[in-house]
Amino acid sequence: DQQVKQNSPSLSVQEGRISILNCDYTNSMFDYFLWYKKYPAEGPTFLISISSIKDKNEDGRFTVFLNKSAKHLSLHIVPSQPGDSAVYFCAASGGGAGGTSYGKLTFGQGTILTVHP
Amino acid sequence: NAGVTQTPKFRILKIGQSMTLQCTQDMNHNYMYWYRQDPGMGLKLIYYSVGAGITDKGEVPNGYNVSRSTTEDFPLRLELAAPSQTSVYFCASSPWDEQFFGPGTRLTVL
């Protein structure tokens, strides 16, 4: 039962253009969503997050959009840079017993982003 | 401030051997987690802890054990290693929802 899905295993974009990474979820109890970036041989690093009470959150070149009715979120990177080439994971939390998830995250499979110079 | 550290970085085990993966954080976070990542897959939660002396199972706990005697340390024990436990293991700590990850331990069971 894959509660968080990233249906695109990979994405290739040109430097300077927009990168759009997508994520779908099935658990309507999720109330907090995060994007992590992972370079080879390193642990994931936090990129940006959004609470379910918002539909957009922006941080520099990175913007996350949340569509709760569609159970869909996306990460936009503008402009894309070669250093953005990495694996991007979508993650979700919330809906645990007693109303708390103890910060536990459910991850998608990841999308490999390649930005070409 | 080292963040989350994990040892060892790499390890090869024979089937049936045991080992402990070490994890230490210096951010005074109450919550700590162990994940495994298999090729082409996302991270799956093995065990988590909400504070010293309190641990609970995640999505894939079979074949593993944990303990949390201090806020800083959260070791993961593999008993009777099996080829299915070949994976990359990540430890993380969190003040709440944003988790901070260690660099990972790549484990191969032959």
Image (cartoon, coloured by chain):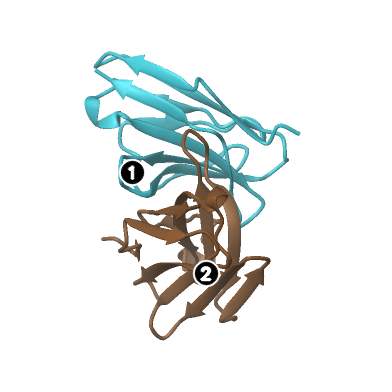
Rendering quarter of residue A108? bottom left
| Residue nearest the viewer, comparing A96 with A89 | A89
Do discs 1 and 2 belong to a common subunit? Answer: no
The C terminus of chain B sits in image quarter? top left
Left or right placement of residue A15 versus residue B80 in this view:
right
Mark drawn on residue B60:
1
Q: Nearer the viewer, mark 1 or mark 2?
A: 2
Q: Residue at x 31, y 31 (%)?
A: B63
Q: Position of residue B58 (x, y in %)?
A: 40, 47
Q: Which chain is cyan?
A: B
Q: Secondary structure at mark 2?
A: strand
| Residue type at numbered disc 2 | His
Residue A73 x/y as whole percent: 45, 73
Q: Which mark is residue A7?
A: none
* Residue picked out by circle 2: A76
Kindly identify which chain the residue marked by label 1 belongs to: B
Q: Is residue B38 above or below residue B98?
A: above
Distance between the Cα atoms at labels 1 and 2?
Answer: 32 Å
Mark 2 neighbour class, 10 Å CA radius: few under 14, some 14 to 19, many 20 or more: some
Q: Secondary structure at mark 1?
A: loop
Asked if one can make out residue B100 in the rendered structure from this viewpoint, the answer is yes
- Report which quarter residue B100 is drawn in: top right
- Label 1 neighbourhood size at 10 Å, few (<14), some (14-19), many (20+)? few
Identify residue type, mark 1. Val
Task: Give the camera-side residue of B39 and A33.
Answer: B39
- As displayed, is residue B32 above or below residue A61? above
Task: Locate residue A86 relative to residue B26 in the image: left or right.
Answer: left
Q: Is residue A5 left or right of residue B55?
A: left
Q: In the displayed structure, would residue B54 be above or below residue A49?
A: above
Query: Measuring 37% from the left and 70% from the top, which residue is drawn there?
Result: A25
Q: Toward the viewer: A107 or B51?
A: A107
Residue lying furthest front: A117
